Amino acid sequence: MSQMNDDTHPQPGDYQPVASPYQWQAPEPAAEKRRVGLGTALALMLAGSVASGSVVGLVAANTASTGSTDVVNSLREPSAPAPESPVGGVERVAANILPAVVSIQVADRTSAGEGSGSIISSDGYVLTNHHVVSGGGDNAFIQVTLNDGRSLPADYVASDSATDIAVVKIRDVSGLPVAQFGDSDELRVGQEVVAIGSPLGLSSTVTSGIISALNRPVRASDGGGESSLIDAVQTDAAINPGNSGGPLVDMNGNIVGMNSVIASMSSGGEAGSIGLGFAIPANFAKRVADQLISTGRATHPMLGVQVAARQDVQGALIASVEPDSPAAQAGLNAGDLVTRVDDRVIDNSDALVAAIRSQDFGQTVALEVQQQDTGQSRQVEVTLTSE
């Protein structure tokens, strides 16, 4: 069973390593096939983000002419509006966002790994994936390579394994270029995007594509007991191992996602892009990163139910309701089948977990609920609280 207010969720399928750092394998049930659009041979692997930005997608610290040491932090800036039409070509987007994209190397005495990241403050905070920085352990050495070729030491700040989001901080820097966040809630299927990262160690690699789908529940396990579930943006921009943590940007150069996962037809060994990549939405990544920097941990909206991992129902079947939880206060009961959250169809337990987790604290959502014994449907409004 999956509990909606902790990090334990049902495992719909096995996940096997395919390439560094991890690989995810798509679940076998029919509902899961429908979700990712491929059969049981599809494997999902943690890769990186490929992103790039355009003219307005980069925020530079204004220190050259004034000598000021003011810190620019994109977590504190409002999300930029979505472009109505492409502003510049991929070349222009890449030229402007590349200075804010970094390569990350993590090593300890026995292992090493790499990924990508985005500079989100002029004093060195970098947004990346949890799985990029977690493999080296507590005593790992972290090095960040800037686009200008400088390699600088960095410190681990905090991470959230449940959502695969992490923050590191480059030591003793100021005036770095900063990537700007866009509004991922305004993304449209078919919208053009650009990705930049360091696939297979090839830094500053640029690819482009479109938004293929939205609200894809994607789960991954690193084989070490940690599992993450993201409410992903799907893109056909080419993403490969080593891209993890890099940005996916719109044609204004604003971050709209952090690429984390790719799909492969292979179930083992190295694999590359087949045009199915998945990114963490920018609004969600921004919220979690702000929490990690401010408090050292992330909390998520809570519904307060446990859901059963059932393959024979179309929806999320509630197994139990926690006393005094938002679900209990709204009148949800064990045996209720949640089939919709607002205008979003819920076809399994992971879809419900991802949909609730992507909401804001204190937000009221409308659930469409079906009683298993009578088949009658009703709408229930629930105000979410934090874990």
Image: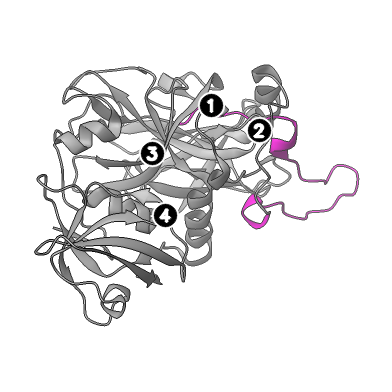
Regarding mark 3 in the picture, which secondary structure is present there? helix
Q: In the image, is 33 to the left or to the right of 117?
A: left
Q: Which residue is mark 2?
A: 253
Q: Amino acid at mark 1?
A: Ala
Is the residue marked by circle 4 packed among few (<14), some (14-19), or many (20+) residues within 10 Å?
A: many
Q: Amino acid at mark 2?
A: Gly
Regarding mark 1 in the picture, which secondary structure is present there? strand
Q: Quadrant of the C terminus?
A: bottom left
Pointer 3 and pointer 1: residues touching (CB < 8 Å)?
Answer: no
Above or below for 384 versus 36: below
Along the polypeptide, which appears first: circle 3 or circle 2?
3
Along the polypeptide, which appears first: circle 1 or circle 4?
1
Q: Which residue is mark 1?
A: 195
Estimate the spatial distance between the alpha carbons at disc 2 and disc 4, rounded to whole Å: 23 Å
Along the polypeptide, which appears first: circle 3 or circle 1?
3
- Region rendered in magenta: 49-77
Is the residue marked by circle 1 packed among few (<14), some (14-19), or many (20+) residues within 10 Å?
A: many
Q: Which residue is mark 4?
A: 358
Residue 315 pos. (x, y %): 21, 51
Estimate the spatial distance between the alpha carbons at disc 3 and disc 2, rounded to whole Å: 24 Å
Q: In the image, is 224 to the left or to the right of 213?
A: left
Image quadrant assignment for residue 28: top left
Q: Quadrant of the N terminus?
A: bottom left
Q: Is residue 140 visible?
A: no
Residue 178 pos. (x, y %): 67, 42
Q: In the image, is 227 to the left or to the right of 371?
A: right
